[in-house]
Image (cartoon, grey):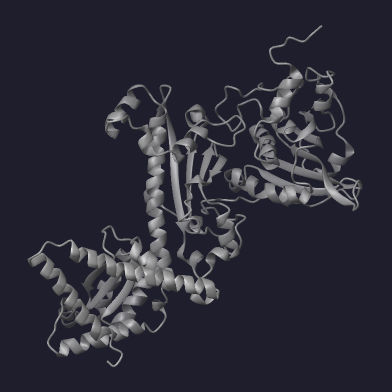
Amino acid sequence: MPNHSIVPVHLAVKAFRDNGYKNAAYAIAELIDNSIQADATSVELLCGERVDMSGQRNRSRIHQIAVLDNGSGMNAEVLQMALQFGNGTHLEDYSGIGRFGLGLPSSSISQARRVEVWSWQDGHQNPIYTYIDIDEIEAGKLEDVPIPTNKPIPELWQEVGYNYGISGSLVVWSKLDRILWRTANTIIKNSESLIGRMYRYFLAEERVKIRLVTFDMDAIRKTEGKYARPNDPLYLLSNTSCPAPWDIIPMFTQADFQNTQFKIRFREEEHTVTVRFSYAKEEARKGSNAGREPHGRHANHNKGVSIVRAGRELDLDTSWSEDAEALRDRWWGAEISFPPELDELFGVTNNKQSARNFSELAKADPETLRELGQTWMATKDEMRQVEDPRLPLSELVNYIRTNISTIRRLLRTQGAITKNKRHSESAQSEEKGTEVVRDRIKEGYLGQSDEQEKQQSAEEREKEIASELVEHGTTQEQAQHLAAQTVSRGLKYTLTKSSLSSPAFFDVRSRGGAMIVSLNVDHPAYQHSLEILQQDLGDLDESKLKESIANARNGLELLLFAWARYEDEQPDGKRRLQAQEVRWDWGRMARDFLDEEE
């Protein structure tokens, strides 16, 4: 008799195998979710290899994967339910990281053709057991999850597993036909970083320990393995997987002024969404190649906005990292955290790999939300009236986008100051400029800074200069050092970098008897000229060196062209004449400053 089921079992299972897990590590994470949901304090990922003798060379290949926990375990009814697709005991439970009822069977068959589960609530010597097997389903031999029976845990898994509690579960995958990583070490290597990042808060707070083990299934089975450490993309946690010295202490600073809790009303209830930001400490970026150092490479793998649900990361969304900012983007972190009650608003996928609605809005042009011919405020009012879910998400996206831009500017300033060798070198241009100023003073040309120099004590001058430098983004320590150097050596100039709010290429202020020249690191003139010349040219090969010099030359030429156009656009008469006179006066001044004979 033909089968007229709405969804034939063997076809449904085949479809579930293609459920979109990014890789084996994400599928394994589903099992860890179940363990944590069951209040496990210990989870073990056990990867067993066997020698493959089918080819020309004998090689060890992954053969079976198991996840062992000391959670609450399952009775027969719950165990049978746990292997059903779309069923489970947490379907309406918004209190933890589980809920969707697909994790165990869906993740398992995405990687393996057979999954077996042992579970116990009164010692691991008395477990119950059941399984699902793709081969048996496709052959029509298995349509229902077998009723759990008493079956001992195989001796192999008892040997390699460390923590068999009074209660717990063991999930074993075999017939691994969809795992791209061929060896146990590769699976552990690729899983360790992801697991450490997904469960960083559980690990940091010692709510759970996750042991990672590889072993030879046909040789000595006992092995120490290693424990996953938190992998924090915000780099605010201590004792993490980041390379030394930043494994012990946080590498980033929390941007307290930008952390915000949003109250979002969804389905007549109010929920809290938290947004946090961080950026690298200055000492983490010291040196010419901090990005190539182990900690810099580690940070490069953690670029993006971390999307966290119920303390467990869903995704590290890399679409926020711009090509133009790709290298610098490793030095900031951002996180948005929300409760499971907002799953539908954020568009959480049932495999818990992304928040689809949020990420799609992050990629979209904000203008696409605005009705044609309508102001943004009017559009927001309409969206609010119909409870359009895009409104709170778009506001979150805009807030994050704005603050990432702010942090990028901060990092450009920080990087420019960090790389400014004038803090320790002889500052030849400042000395040359000071000589010219002293000569002009003798000729009777006085400036505002000269009056300050006469009227203030050395201590007052240092304090005023340091205060101005701090205002422009220099650290307190650097500002005090630079101010002391300026006053003690009688320099009339201090050069610094800053993210200026004005469109000016640079800013000039007279403070403490010196002229503080602040280059605007956000201005294209800086990025296309001085920034290029201030990089460590000795690290560049000949072709890159020529390219950098050519780019700097083009940048300086374009500056001249910009001034020429400025004059050209002035109306005939007084304004055009004033522009020409400013150019002439500056030219005379520049001649004095650049004259080598002086």
Residue 130 sits in which quadrant?
top right
Task: Check the picture and name the quadrant holding the N terminus.
Answer: top right
Left or right: 29 as drawn, with respect to 349 = right
- Residue 568 drawn above or below residue 171: below
- Residue 339 drawn above or below residue 445: above
Q: Nearer the viewer, residue 351 or 312?
A: 351
Q: Residue at x 87, y 31 (%)?
A: 152
Work out whether residue 291 can be spotted: yes
Task: Check the picture and name the quadrant holding the C terminus.
Answer: bottom left
Residue 577 sits in which quadrant?
bottom left
**Residue 503 point in image, percent of width and height:** 26, 59
Residue at the extreme top: 1
**Residue 24 point in image, percent of width and height:** 70, 41
Q: Residue at x 64, y 32 (%)?
A: 37
Q: Residue at x 56, y 56 (%)?
A: 300
Q: Residue at x 60, y 29 (%)?
A: 350
